[in-house]
């Protein structure tokens, strides 16, 4: 390792004036830079005297504190499948297209659904500030079948219509669900 990056924070870069997400982005960029160039990044603060605050090396692993991981289903269209690694290229109904990592078996199955509306079940990594999907690992293709809105509401009415008709006060019913009020609907 023969390269060194030195960063000095001055007095006028008060921590209160910089958003923690901005600092995390800078540190993440430094982590990538040290790995790409096999070098160290030394962060110093000047507070009357210069003090070494941190050293980031190519082996440094920084926890991802600003993302949320969870299981979800995305609905949209499979645009492409394949690549060196099993990947499903997917255009959600809402949002921009994403590349979804998956297994070889699921990628083969997804090939049968090209240009078809499907539900992809999997693990999403979301940015907690914007809720943008950062990555998605597809685990299954759901039974989702795109339907005409009138057909969907007709089926819903046939399934729960009698039950829904028995609700006389929708606001009270919703309050009971939200707050657990014991009063009968």
Image: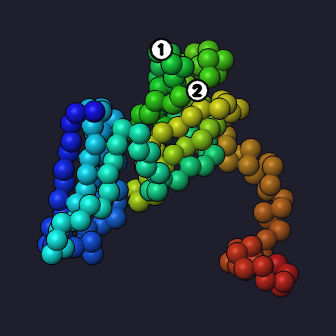
The answer to whether residue 146 shows anywhere in this view is no
First in sequence, mark 1 or 2: give its number: 1
- Residue 151 is situated, as x and y percent measured from the top left of the image, at 67, 40
The figure's colour scheme reads rainbow
**Distance from the alpha carbon under mark 1 to that under mark 2:** 12 Å
Asked if marks 1 and 2 touch (Cβ < 8 Å), the reply is: no
Residue at x 23%, y 65% (from the top left corner): 51
The answer to whether residue 88 shows anywhere in this view is yes
**Mark sitting on residue 84:** 1
Residue at x 47%, y 26% (from the top left corner): 89
- Residue 182 is situated, as x and y percent measured from the top left of the image, at 84, 83
The picture quadrant where one finds residue 160 is bottom right
Question: Counting other residues with Cα less than 10 Å from the Cα at mark 1, is it few (<14), some (14-19), or many (20 or more)?
Answer: few
**Mark sitting on residue 102:** 2
The picture quadrant where one finds residue 111 is top right
Question: Counting other residues with Cα less than 10 Å from the Cα at mark 2, is it few (<14), some (14-19), or many (20 or more)?
Answer: some
Looking at the rendered structure, the number of numbered marks drawn on it comes to 2
Residue 131 higher or lower than 75, as above or below: below
Q: Which quarter of the rendered picture does the N terminus lie within? A: top left
Viewer-closest of 10 and 182: 10
């Amino acid at each position: 390792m023969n390269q060194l990056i030195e960063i000095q924070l001055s007095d006028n870069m008060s921590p209160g004036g910089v958003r923690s997400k901005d600092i995390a982005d800078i540190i993440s960029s430094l982590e990538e830079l040290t790995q790409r160039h096999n070098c160290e990044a030394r962060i110093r603060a000047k507070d009357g005297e210069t003090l070494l605050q941190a050293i980031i090396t190519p082996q440094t692993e920084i926890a991802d504190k600003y993302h949320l991981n969870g299981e979800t289903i995305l609905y949209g269209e499979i645009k492409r499948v394949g690549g060196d690694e099993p990947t499903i290229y997917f255009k959600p109904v809402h949002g921009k297209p994403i590349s979804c990592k998956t297994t070889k078996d699921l990628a083969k199955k997804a090939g049968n659904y090209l240009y078809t509306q499907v539900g992809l079940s999997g693990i999403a990594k979301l940015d907690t500030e914007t809720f943008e999907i950062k990555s998605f690992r597809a685990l299954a293709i759901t039974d989702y079948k795109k339907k005409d809105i009138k057909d969907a509401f007709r089926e819903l009415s046939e399934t729960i219509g009698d039950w829904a008709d028995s609700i006389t006060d929708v606001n009270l019913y919703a309050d009971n669900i939200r707050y657990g009020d014991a009063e009968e609907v």
